[in-house]
């Protein structure tokens, strides 16, 4: 009986899922936390303090997910390694790292291990914002047509701002970098011994188009006159999703307990790979991949340039369709920040007494309020704004505090703020004729917070579907692993065939409450006012405050 493995690399951990592709059943799964997590203060093994807005990772953590997670799912299931016909991998993106010619990350070479720019830059590394700003100014001044494909702005989270930051701040690291690769492509390289870059990350994160290629060299020269060859570290060959990158290197196969004939699919993005996992094959549905942040994805049969999104790419999500991406940069990590720093001992002790988590206690208390009852309203910009303002220098705002305000009221306002941000994104799509008729939520938050799901339904006025699996991205990667293996090995000929056989089952549909929606419509009107007041460049309040903080660190 054929099985495939999906590996989903997140911000703090990696998840490994073993999928029975005949019975459409997740046989076993395991989460492997990263030992070094998000590196934002001290470089590992040194006392060197990183500057503000840096976010790095350790590639050894990525390897540990393989060497610990894969043998564990096999042992838990009793499945023989030779019955696993394919592996698919997805990653948070844009997470990128410099490597030597043999594929070894520079930070794992003694000569470079103490150089911060030699380490992988996580998606939420925002220290390249000044370069993104410069790229935007040049693109706007010169009328570059590619910019409208990305909603009108290049993000500091993407490939070229991070690469040019290395070029300008540590030329030695840049010159000794053979390739600057997405982490998802690096893992595929590690598994197969072959550099095989995927078209999805190239399209969404590296400004590449299958029709136009990269922006003209003259554009990059206007950004930095010495940066003359933008494709040098990126390459020029990109493979469609579902392509077989190769098979496992024998030594790696032996370490993982798998066959060296096991197919490996080209890499993917955690958000994009979730779409087939929940059965989406056409327009009308927005998939929300909810974790530390949210990626919003929808597809269309034609290309529309949409202001404020993070990209539209042909075949970027599903073959033959245009995939649209938007997102919110702070969701789960904003809730974690609040519970870590602003919940009093009284709440912690109460949660312990009830044998529940602090999150569960706050959810229980926050659910007692009606829409609008807290009098609070927040902007969810704790990690900047991804859509629709594309401004990493924006910061969070909460208004309406009184001396009677309680932590559970603030918590509810934070939950609501993410729903309002999603509604803003939906409105932005609808304004240009891209219709959204239903929402699909996946990721841990969709399971852990029924209150949040109901708030999304009420705020957006749309049904929200939650599926049974907690590992939707890993499941999607396993589906692409089945496509890479192909029909001859017991897999599938296309991702659409895999969708027909392997779509996850529905757990619950949250329908909008009409009375709640009426009130939320009114609150949303206020939200739009403060969104524009604090978020548009004409008002520099938040930028000035951040500049003051950065200058005093």
Image (cartoon, rainbow, N blue to C red):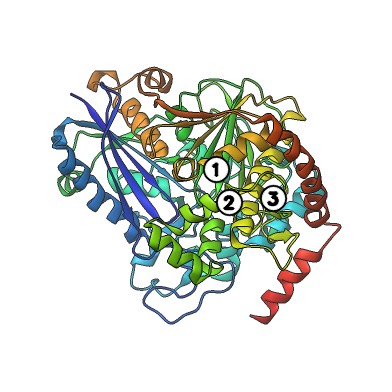
- The numbered mark, 1 or 3, whose residue comes first in the sequence reads 3
SS label for mark 1:
helix
For the residue pair 155 and 124, the one nearer the viewer reads as 124
For the residue pair 369 and 4, the one nearer the viewer reads as 369
Task: Name the residue tied to disc 2.
Answer: 366
Q: Residues within 10 Å of mark 3 (few under 14, many from 20)?
A: many
- The numbered mark, 2 or 1, whose residue comes first in the sequence reads 2
Where residue 74 sits in the image (x, y, percent)?
18, 41
Task: Name the residue tied to disc 3.
Answer: 390
Q: CA distance from mark 2 to mark 3?
A: 30 Å
Front label number (1 vs 3): 1
Q: Is residue 493 above or below residue 27?
A: above
Cβ atoms at labels 2 and 1 below 8 Å apart: yes
Where residue 200 sits in the image (x, y, percent)?
51, 37
The N terminus appears in which quarter of the rendering? Answer: top left
Tell me: 122 left or right of 515. Answer: left
């Amino acid at each position: 009986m054929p099985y495939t493995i999906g590996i989903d690399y997140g911000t703090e951990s990696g998840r490994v899922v073993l999928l029975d592709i005949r019975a459409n059943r997740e046989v076993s799964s395991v989460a492997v936390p990263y030992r070094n997590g998000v590196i934002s203060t001290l470089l590992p093994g040194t006392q060197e303090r990183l500057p503000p807005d840096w976010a790095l990772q350790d590639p050894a953590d990525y390897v540990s997910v393989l060497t610990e997670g894969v043998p564990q799912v096999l042992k838990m299931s009793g499945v023989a390694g030779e019955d696993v016909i394919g592996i698919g991998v997805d990653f948070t993106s844009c997470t990128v790292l410099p490597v030597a010619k043999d594929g070894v990350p520079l930070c794992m070479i003694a000569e470079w291990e103490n150089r911060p720019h030699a380490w992988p830059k996580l998606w939420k590394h925002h220290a390249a914002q000044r370069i993104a700003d410069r790229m935007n100014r040049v693109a706007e001044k010169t009328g570059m047509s590619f910019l409208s494909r990305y909603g009108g702005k290049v993000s500091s989270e993407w490939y070229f701002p991070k690469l040019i930051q290395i070029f300008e701040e540590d030329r030695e690291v840049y010159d000794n970098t053979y390739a600057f690769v997405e982490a998802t492509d690096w893992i595929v390289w590690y598994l197969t011994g072959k550099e095989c870059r995927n078209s999805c990350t190239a399209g969404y994160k590296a400004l590449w188009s299958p029709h136009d290629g990269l922006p003209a060299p003259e554009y990059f020269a206007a950004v930095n006159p010495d940066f003359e060859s933008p494709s040098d570290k990126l390459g020029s060959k990109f493979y469609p999703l579902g392509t077989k990158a190769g098979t496992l290197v024998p030594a790696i196969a032996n370490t993982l307990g798998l066959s060296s004939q096991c197919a490996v699919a080209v890499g993917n993005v955690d958000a994009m790979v979730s779409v087939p996992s929940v059965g989406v094959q056409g327009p009308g549905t927005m998939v929300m991949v909810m974790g530390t942040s949210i990626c919003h994805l929808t597809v269309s049969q034609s290309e529309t340039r949409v202001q404020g999104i993070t990209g539209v790419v042909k075949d970027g999500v599903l073959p033959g369709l245009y995939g649209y991406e938007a997102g919110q940069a702070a969701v789960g990590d904003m809730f974690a920040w609040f519970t870590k720093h602003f919940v009093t001992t009284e709440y912690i002790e109460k949660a312990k007494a009830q044998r529940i988590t602090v999150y569960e206690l706050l959810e229980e208390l926050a659910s007692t309020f009606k829409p609008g009852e807290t009098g609070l309203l927040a902007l969810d910009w704790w990690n900047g704004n991804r859509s629709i303002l594309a401004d990493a220098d924006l910061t969070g705002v909460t208004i309406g505090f009184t001396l009677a305000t309680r932590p559970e009221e603030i918590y509810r306002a934070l939950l609501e703020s993410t729903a309002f941000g999603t509604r803003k994104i939906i409105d932005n799509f609808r304004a240009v004729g891209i219709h959204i008729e239903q929402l699909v939520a996946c990721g841990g938050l969709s399971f852990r917070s029924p209150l949040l799901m109901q708030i999304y339904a009420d705020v957006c006025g749309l049904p929200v579907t939650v599926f049974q699996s907690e590992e939707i991205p890993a499941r999607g990667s396993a589906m692409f692993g089945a496509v890479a293996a192909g029909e001859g090995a017991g897999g599938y000929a296309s991702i659409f065939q895999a969708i027909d056989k392997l779509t996850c089952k529905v757990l619950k549909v949250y329908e909008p409450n009409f009375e709640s929606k009426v009130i939320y419509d009114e609150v949303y009107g206020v939200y739009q006012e403060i969104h524009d007041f604090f978020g548009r460049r004409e008002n520099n309040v938040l930028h000035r405050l951040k500049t003051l903080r950065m200058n005093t660190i």
